[in-house]
Image (cartoon, helix red, strand yellow):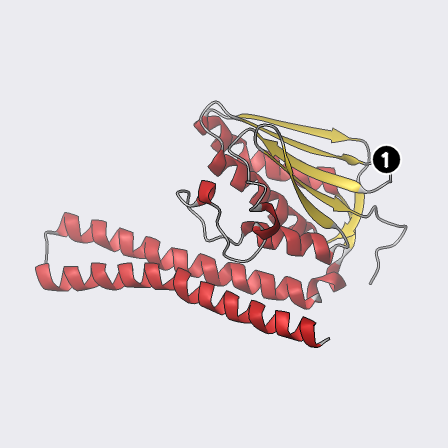
Amino acid sequence: MLDHIEHLIASVSNVSNSIAHDLRTPIAELRSRLEELALTRPPAAETFAEIDAAVADVDRVMRIFNALLRLAEIDSGARRSGFVRVDAAAVAARVVEFYEPAAEQKGVRFSFEADGATPVAGDPVLLAQAISNLIDNSLKSVAEDGAIRVRVGCRADGAVEIAVADNGPGIADGDKPKATERFFRGDASRSSPGVGLGLSIVEAVAKLHGGVLQLLDNNPGLLAQMVLPVATARPAP
């Protein structure tokens, strides 16, 4: 128990340090932009361009806070009270439809496959958020003319599997155990936009639903799959 408490304290400390680090950059950029505007008083067109950039800095800070609030809500388990019987394939289909224009614009081959009935007891909003995060990560990582495949089906053991596979750079074996840590960003993702909370949310959603998130090699690329228990006749309270 003492080891567990010590680990939790260390985790809180690490997350706090990460939050401070990730918030410092956009806030510092915002202050620099506003200070420069106040000192130089540039023409209107340049001023509005800097205001737009400042708004983007504020949006980045808000995304960090919103993601942390969502994680706190998931960790509390409060959302379990709203669990209903839901078709995982139908949820995934709606998310895929939302991302199709972005994939088409980037020239990415985007496919979806559903295999039979996939009932789970869960929160459809959180499941959609988790699937969105997985697809969004793949879209950021694959190159133009890359490929992303989303598949939902039942495994031989009866569990429901929601899988997103791509042919991007993937995640190094040494980084896989750390990839779901909050604010962790591997070498392959440092140049892409994001704050390092996407996979943390996916793992939290999977655990809330009694499942797991698995990160596997797609050779090439990443195969990320949520494995969830199939719904019983009535969702657990």
Q: Does 33 sit left or right of 5 as displayed?
A: left
Specify the amino acid type for callout 1: Ala
Going 69% across and 50% down the picture, which residue do you hit? Answer: 124
Question: Going 59% across and 54% down the picture, which residue do you hit?
Answer: 200
- Residue identifier under label 1: 156
Q: Is residue 235 left or right of residue 42?
A: right
In the image, 181 versus 63, the foreground residue is: 181
Q: Position of residue 69 (x, y in %)?
A: 55, 64
Q: Secondary structure at mark 1?
A: loop
> What's the residue at 73%, 31% (across, down)?
114
Q: Nearer the viewer, residue 231 or 171?
A: 171
Q: Is residue 139 left or right of residue 116?
A: left
- Name above or below for residue 30 compared with residue 112: below
Q: Is residue 12 above or below residue 61?
A: below
- For the C terminus, the image quarter is bottom right
Tell me where residue 159 appears, x and y as whole percent: 82, 42
Q: Position of residue 90 (x, y in %)?
A: 71, 38
